[in-house]
Image: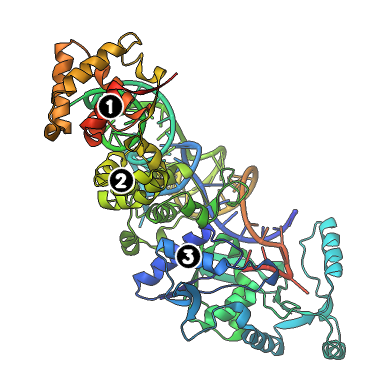
Amino acid sequence: MRTRFAPSPTGSLHVGGLRTALYSYLMAKQTEGQFLLRIEDTDQSREVPGAVDIILRGLHWAGLDPDEGVVMIEGVPGETGNLGPYYQSKRLEKYRHAVDQLVSGGHAYPCFCTPERLEQMRSAQAAKHQAPMYDRHCLTLSFDEVQMRLKAGDKHVIRMKVPHEETITFEDDIRGQVSFQGKTIDDQVLLKSDGFPTYHLAHVVDDHLMGIDLVIRGEEWLSSLPKHLLLFRWLGWTAPRYAHVPLLLNKDKSKLSKRQNSVSVEEYIAKGYLPEAMLNFLAMLGWNDGTTQELFTMQELMEKFSLDRVQKSGAIFDLDKLNWLQGQWIRKLTTEEFSARIFPLVINAYPEATDDKDFAKKAALIQERITFFQEAPEMLGYFYHDPFIEKDLVANKKQKVTEEDVPRYVKILIDTLEPIDEKDWNEATLESVIRSAVEKNELKLGQLLWPLRALLTGREYSPGAFEVAAALGKEMVMKRLTAPKMEQ
RNA sequence: GGCCUCAUCGUCUAUCGGUUAGGACACCAGGUUUUCAUCCUGGAAAGCCGGGUUCGAUUCCCGGUGAGGCUGCCA
């Protein structure tokens, strides 16, 4: 099966687009088919330089590299495949050819109406509570007049001539049977006056010529599907199958928008989301495998995904769930992977960490404690510089450590830890000696551990006291206990 | 306004006529040999409304209501 993703180069890759790309990719891969990328750059006014690069990089990040069409070649956007070009702006003659065929078949006609006239017409229709539709004014022009104006080079568009008496019925892979009455369908512009096609024409021509047999796209396209089907029929082509996926929604249930959400994949990449988490999240928004499984790898998605289990209603883009997934996937990384991922961030903040042979050990301590790699430097800072200790931090009511107790507890800690030999300095030893000190002094464990941890890290929360002390080494621990950098 | 689509906990969803309507996120409570996090246990939380079909409807049909999408020489 051949599927495609066909975004417009408007500057960013939309998460909704990434989801349809994912579904398309999965459908292609399940059947060992191809997943293509085509760039829909037919609106010159909306084009943004560098946009294709962004799209390609986003897809690559997600692991959805296209097999054919516009692809990254040695780091720059290029094209591969023999059904190109894969940029619509380079396919103008193909659209022109299709349009000629439609016009000569009587299914399309030139329209010379000015934007001003169209606007007037629409507001008049609105005033009468009528659906705004082209009134077919230019269809009343005589053959000779049309020829004359064409020859004179009058500005015009080509519109499709929708049969009003017909009802168009079709089968959508997600929604089932849907039908439209011809009289409610507008005579869509197919070719703009600048010679570029509109989406409708370009989609039909390209998806036919590129051999696409399943089109997966957002629900916002459902109402223009009858137009597309008409075009396929008039051109004598077999239409592909269609699957209109439910929309991604804002909290207020409107179509996911920039105003209310981060909608571009680049933003999520920058925030440090794992592609695994994003893909998992996107797959689950509107699809499930029928079991209670929540975590899916790309491999599992490839095996289990199916359109008939895709939801019909829109899904709110719930960041809480994404973040939970992110945490799950962070924890699934091996210690080595996790460590390698946070290393550059940490040495950027603490160059001292560069030569730290035990970095991976420290990294392991925080893997269960963070959701984003970016949190790592902050969580590891005290390993690389002596923290300032706020007075209020060491005394802690809940741990039954009063300000007056602190000196005594610290002394117990020093007396307990000092005798330990450097080579016995590890979590197990630390735990056992501190436990016996607790017993001997009739204290609660927290009464020693809280001040210890606080003095070592300077933080309200961190990995456990034993772990931190072990990782820090005896020298540093003793230094921080005996001469803490107190902050008043 | 017209056309189209959709409708189960706050959110994502399971259920293919018979269930104490299940799971997950979020939330609340408790536990997990100090904190935070993780993890575990428990709790609260849903079939939009009205008809019909049926022995029996969340499930099938109709109507209403609500929500969304489209209604551009944008995609």
Q: Chain of mark 1?
A: A
If you read the primary sequence from the N terminus, does the residue marked by circle 2 or circle 1 appear first? 2
As shown in the figure, which amino acid type bears the numbered disc 2? Answer: Arg
Element at badge 1? helix
In-image side of A380 versus A427 (left or right)? right
- Closer to the camera, A344 or A463? A344
Residue located beneath label 3 in the image: A57
Tell me if label 3 and label 1 are in contact, CB under 8 Å: no
- Measured Cα–Cα span from mark 2 to mark 3: 25 Å
* Nearer to me, A207 or A142: A207
Q: Amino acid under label 3? A: Arg
Relative image position of residue B65 (x, y in whole percent) = 64, 43
Residue on which disc 1 sits: A479
Report how far apart the C-alphas of labels 3 and 1 lie in the structure. 48 Å
Please, is residue A433 above or below residue A71 in the view? above
- Looking at the rendered structure, which numbered label has been put on residue A331? 2
Q: Secondary structure at mark 3?
A: helix
Question: Are discs 2 and 1 located on one and the same chain?
Answer: yes
Residue A106 versus residue A173 in the image, above or below? below
Amino acid carrying label 1: it is Lys
Front tag of 3 and 1? 1
The quarter of the displayed image where residue A460 is located: top left
Residue A309 tag number: none
Left or right of A361? Residue A66 is: right
Rate crowding at label 3 as few (under 14), some (14 to 19) or many (20 or more) other CA atoms within 10 Å: many
Residue A122 on image: x %, y %: 82, 63
Label 2, residues with CA under 10 Å away: few <14, some 14-19, many ≥20: some
Q: Nearer the viewer, mark 2 or mark 1?
A: 1
On screen, residue A363 versus residue A118, left or right, reads left
Q: Determine which quarter of the picture holds residue B2.
A: bottom right
